[in-house]
Amino acid sequence: MSADFFNSAESAVTYASTAAEIILLIRLTWLGLLKDFKLFAIYLAFDAVRTAALAGWNYHALSYEWVWATTVPLSTLLLASASIELSYGLRQPFPSETGNRAFGLYGFLIGMTVSAVASMLAHPQAILRSTVLLTIIGRRCILTGCVLGILAQGAYLLVGGAPLIANWRLHRRILLTYLAAVVIALFASTTSQKQYAEWINLICNTSLFACFWLWTALLAPSRAQSWADVRDLSFYNSLLTSRSKNEESLA
């Protein structure tokens, strides 16, 4: 495939994704979910504005590189914050339960460390010479940590049979897919196999577009969320009973 094909296809997907982000923001507002997904909504708004601003810019220009380099860290932090928001949302029914947060934190630290070590081994000298590469690797490390953090937390909640409100279950799955697609695209951007990198990048961008529409189509109104919409509570009931007995014995 020619470079013109990939450039045209990526531009089309980028424009479509930006429009989908805006529609998703409107949908979140309509469903009354902005208070639940505040950080996620801020990320969507920032990413849509950032993408629209850079879309018509000549990416060879020095000014484009400066804007890109200064906005990527903030975009990364906002996306990582959406993962932290997810961590808190998943434990809504029982705020005193902290095990899932510990597993999420360990997963994040392990994922970030593994990604950083792999990047250092793959580009030992280039990192020192390229600010852009260093920015990409930093973004990749943080978001890889988020992916493993969500996976670790999800494994803990699955084993424990934790109650999860439907919107948060859905949000976890789609956000995990979204983050994984971003991480794969970031790894592909630094590979020497450019003939595969272009295809991978196009597939990942298409996946991001699909994620926006899944969020838009499947999230339910906040007023529709109730305790009838969560999984079995037996694990947490026994956990709270055990804690109450321990507190009584200590008293």
Image (tube, rainbow, N blue to C red):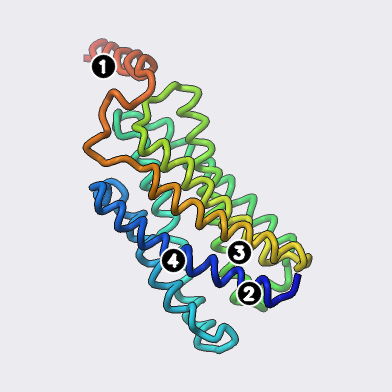
Q: Residue at x 58, y 47 (%)?
A: 111
Q: Amino acid at mark 2?
A: Asn
Q: Residue at x 36, y 14 (%)?
A: 234
Residue wearing tag 1: 247
Mark 3–mark 2 distance (CA, rounded to whole Å): 23 Å
**Image-based side of 9 in relation to 121, left or right:** left
Mark 2–mark 1 distance (CA, rounded to whole Å): 63 Å
Give the SS element for disc 1: helix
Quadrant hosting residue 235: top left
Mark 1–mark 4 distance (CA, rounded to whole Å): 52 Å
Q: Residues within 10 Å of mark 2 (few under 14, many from 20)?
A: few
Q: Is residue 174 above or below residue 203?
A: above
Mark 3–mark 4 distance (CA, rounded to whole Å): 24 Å
Residue 18's label in the rendered image is 4
Of labels 3 and 4, the one closer to you: 4
Whether residues under marks 3 and 4 lie with C-beta atoms below 8 angstroms apart, the answer is no
Q: Residues within 10 Å of mark 3 (few under 14, many from 20)?
A: many
3 or 2: tag closer to the N-terminus: 2
Of labels 2 and 1, the one closer to you: 2
Whether residues under marks 2 and 1 lie with C-beta atoms below 8 angstroms apart, the answer is no
Looking at the rendered image, the quarter that the C terminus falls into is: top left
Residue wearing tag 3: 137
Looking at the rendered image, the quarter that the N terminus falls into is: bottom right
3 or 1: tag closer to the N-terminus: 3
Whether residues under marks 3 and 2 lie with C-beta atoms below 8 angstroms apart, the answer is no
Q: Residues within 10 Å of mark 1 (few under 14, many from 20)?
A: few
Residue 110 point in image, percent of width and height: 58, 45
Give the SS element for disc 2: helix
2 or 1: tag closer to the N-terminus: 2
Whether residues under marks 1 and 4 lie with C-beta atoms below 8 angstroms apart, the answer is no
Q: Amino acid at mark 3?
A: Ile
Residue 87 point in image, percent of width and height: 39, 41
